[in-house]
Image (spheres, rainbow, N blue to C red):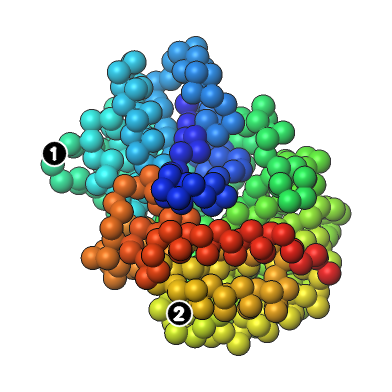
Amino acid sequence: MLINPPNCGRSIPEEQYGITSLKQIFKGEPFSLEVLAGPLTEHEVIIFDLKCESEDAFWRAFDQFRPDIAGLTALTCEANTAVGIAGKIKQRCNATVVIGGNHATYSPDYFNRDEFDYIVMGLGKKSFADLVDRLAAGEKGEGIAGVAQTSPGKTLSYKSRKYSEVDLIDAVAPRYDLVAKYRSQYFLEQLGLAIGFVITAYGCTHKCSFCTIPGITGGKYLTHSTDSVIRDIQTLGDIPFIRMVDANTFGNLALAMELCDKIRQAGIKKKFFADVRADTIVKHPELLKNWKEAGLYAVVVGFEDFQDARLAAYDKKYQGHVITKAIEILHNLGIVIVGDFIATPEYDESDFAKLEGFITANKIEIPVISVLTPIPGTPLYKTKEKDIIIHDLDYYTFTNAVTKTKMPAALFYDTYASLIKRLHEKPHKPG
Ligand code: SF4
């Protein structure tokens, strides 16, 4: 049984200042679990999405299915909740409990406790499949690269995995069928359209200081074959909107072009949504033009900031002028921009005002502003560790300042919330 934890992050602005608009809600299908289920062809597998159903319903399903293995995934802000669920499972039965996901990858020691039997680190499709096969054969999961057997009170011992295309197990599709009953709940709120996820690549070509993506594949950028991506898009049937959930969709130019060509050749008529770096857009505008013709509707661009010093501190490897050029290209092509920006706890009122000025002047259709959060295990964490004042991971939702704010905290959150409200009230319509 693969388990997606419930929405569980906590909100300082809500709890301390009564600002309810900043609470982060993580929505969308539990795609990583569908991917993990793909190779488990010899086993009976179900996915339970606690973001879609109640805890009571979960325990009813659990008792009915009586899994031999319970697998949980958790972001950092979900880590404590995953521990709680695992503890209840252990009280209830003898199931082997496995944890994977972002927090397990970056902070495996966090889960070295009685509630868990195994920790899967990094891209886990192959590691988890190997572990399940071993356990089903009545063996232990020792010695599988990328898998640690827990040993509470002792140091974790495991072999690191050297990720390669083998870890993608390209030949099997994600088990979309396992979340069919939740499908009506996975839709794009702004457009009211049903949305399905596919992935074209894992990892990234870059290593921005705050980002958890590169560590998932040990710093490698691993691409799926374009045929397997077409297969997955077609498996999603008549779902009109396809979100490519890679963190960097066009990191391999030749494959990005090939996929675009194959989408057209296959006569696929859908709207696509991809994550693209600003420098990729500027270096390869023709790629974006071709993709626009193939159905690219919107791109998420992690601009993060527009000031060179901050971009350098994030190790983005480009400067502010690249961002304005990328925006111009996207607008000329009529591609909707979801622009990610980071407000740091060091922001003062003039920083928020400058950010608002930039977003407004550049007519970014869907701006998303998060608060700089040093996730344990990232390069940013090493530089910010001494400044962290909030260690409870429930607050690591990217809408809380876990390091001290330069402004009084109440004013910081009020300014942040007011900015988001104004941006939402006067959205820039797609051109
Ligand atoms: S922020 Fe984007 S470009 Fe930077 S490492 Fe993460 S995924 Fe890659």
At 36% from the left and 22% from the top, the residue drawn is: 89
Nearer-the-camera pick, 153 or 16: 16
The answer to whether 102 appears left or right of 277 in the picture is left
Q: Which residue is mark 1?
A: 153
At 47% from the left and 26% from the top, the residue drawn is: 1
The answer to whether 8 appears left or right of 160 in the picture is right
Whether ligand 1 has any atom under 8 Å from the Cβ at mark 2 is answered as no
Q: Which residue is mark 2?
A: 310
Residue 382: x and y in percent read 28, 67
At 45% from the left and 79% from the top, the residue drawn is: 310
Please determine whether, in this image, residue 200 is positioned above or below residue 279. above
Residue 171: x and y in percent read 59, 45
The answer to which of marks 2 and 1 sits earlier in the sequence is 1
Quadrant in the rendering for residue 385 = bottom left
Q: Amino acid at mark 1?
A: Gly
At 76% from the left and 67% from the top, the residue drawn is: 428
Nearer-the-camera pick, 405 or 270: 405
Disc 2 secondary structure class: helix
Q: CA distance from mark 2 to mark 1?
A: 40 Å
Please determine whether, in this image, residue 417 is positioned above or below residue 149. below
